[in-house]
Structure formats: structure tokens, C-alpha cells
Image (tube, rainbow, N blue to C red):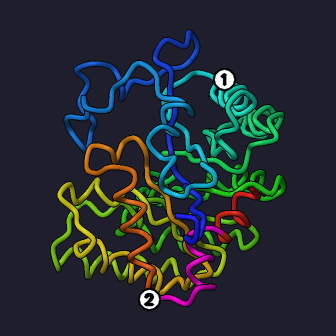
Amino acid sequence: MTDAVPFIDTHVHFWDLAHPELTYGWLQPGVAHPILGDIEGIKSPRFDATHLWAEARFAGVEAFVHVQAAVGTPDPVVETRWLTEMAARYGHPAAIVAHADLAGADVEQVLDRHGESALLRGVRDFAVEPALAADADQRLDPGLRALTRRGLLLDLDCEWPHMPAAAQLARRHPDLVVVLEHLGYPRRRDPEYFRGWRRGIDALAAVPNVHCKISGVGMGDPRWSSESIAPWIGYCIEVFGPQRCVFGTNWPVDRLFSSYDAIVTAYRDAVAGLSDAEQRQVLHDNAVALYRL
């Protein structure tokens, strides 16, 4: 692994179910995930940097970016503070994508409180896609402008039918960095879905301030292989270019479908046909720039 390009994982989740102020409804025993169904296999009481490093330490990984996990917590800043304390203790995560209600009247204050952590790099708000679907996304504009002023990015959860609307949103905010998560979270892997997904990806890739995070590949393809994911990864790199793609594991959620080493190896194999410089971009350098590591 010493000769391999160091890998930066741009999508991981930590949690502590015993934390008195953090809520993780999706991780409670017996609760089925709304899309994945049974995820009991990952529901440990706590998953922090020490647990992740135990799984990832042989994969040539250099840094981790945490993306909100405490979904439903009344004050999302509590999660940022908890993660910042973890980073001071263990060295991970290197950056945080937090939650904020981008349409909320208090979005400026919430972002400023998040910003007390030097690790804050962006926001994910699951309400963005429903707003796109309802043609109500302009109500997000004040929050998106607040992100832009603070140099924070938007981690975007968005399926392909809503990607053209997301592209319009990104055009309205040309100075906002938008990162599409999980290749747009494809729900199916059949040819018809693939054609629709490509149209959505094309719409987003045409907007220069949009980037693509290749992550969560097992969620729509539980029995994935390097061969099955190659067309999806290859198309993202083709249309966004190696300059606008990064990789993430979605760990430990994707442990349901893989081992950590296996997915990172598959990612390395997927870019083996690129030049050495391009491989370094997608595995490492783009993430350093986007998440200011």
C-alpha cells in the first residue's frame, strides 16, 4: 500500500446512541431503514473514530469526512461539537458536513454556531430534494447564500428525476460548491433506470460548480461487484471529469454490502485506466480542495 495514492474518504458516519442530546431514530433497534430495510447488522451502540480506523487502517486511507448522522436531533450543533471533541482526541474526522435547516429563519445563527468548529466544511439538508420536487426550492435561496458567504459547500442528496431542478438551483448560486452524494443514490440498476440516471447526471455535470461524490455504491446494488459498479463510476468520471469527482465509502452503512478494504480496492481498480495524475485527483487531491483538508 505504500506505493498507492493515499485515499480520502469523503463520506462516513459516527454515532453514540447513549449520548443524552443526540437522536438517531434510524439506528434504534427494530427500526427499519425507509429505503434499505433491515440494517440491524450495523446498529452498534457506538461507532466512532477508533472503530472506523480498526476497519480502515490497511486501506491506505489518509482522512475521513463525517456527514450528518444524528438525524432528528433538535439542535444539530450538538453533533458538530461532539465530533470536534472526537477529532481532538483521536485525529478523526478531518472535516464535518453538518445539518442545518436551509429554509429556517435561524439558518444564519445555526451556521455561525456550527462554525465555532474549525472542522465545519458544509451542510447536508434532506429537505432540499423535497423542495426541488415540489418546485419550492427558491425558499432555500437565503440559506444557500448564507452557505456561500461562509465558504461552505452543499452536500446534495438527490435522485435523478430531480437533478435538472438541482442543476437550476446550482446555476442560481454559481459561487456555491455543490457535491452530489452517492452518485445520485440510484435505486435500481436496470438499463431503463441507467438511461434516466445518465440524463440527470448530464444535467448536473453541465453546471461547473457541481461535483460528484462516488459513494454508497452498495445501497442500490447489495451484491455489487467491481464489474457491476464500473459503468456507474465510469460515467460519472466521464461527464464530470476527473477534476470534479471524489470517493466516499458511506461507512459503516455500506458494511452491510462489503468490507472496507474491498470497496476501496474496487475504487482504485475503477480508476486504474486514468493517468497517475488523474488517479491522484479523484482519490485524494479533489477531496483536499473541496473539504479544505
Task: Identify residue for label 2.
Answer: 273
Q: Are marks 1 and 2 in contact (CB under 8 Å)?
A: no
Tell which of 66 and 277 is nearer to you. Answer: 277
The tag earlier along the polypeptide, 1 or 2, is 1
Residue at 51 percent across and 45 percent down: it is 12
Q: Quadrant of the C terminus?
A: bottom right
Residue at 45 percent across and 66 percent down: it is 214
Where residue 221 sits, quadrant-wise, is bottom left
Say above or below: 101 vs 254: above
Where residue 133 sits, quadrant-wise, is bottom left
Task: Identify residue for label 1.
Answer: 78
Image: magenta residue range: 274-284
Mark 1 vs mark 2: give the one in front.
2
Residue at 60 percent across and 64 percent down: it is 6
In the picture provided, is 8 more to the left or to the right than 109? Answer: left
Residue at 73 percent across and 52 percent down: it is 142
Tell which of 66 and 78 is nearer to you. Answer: 66
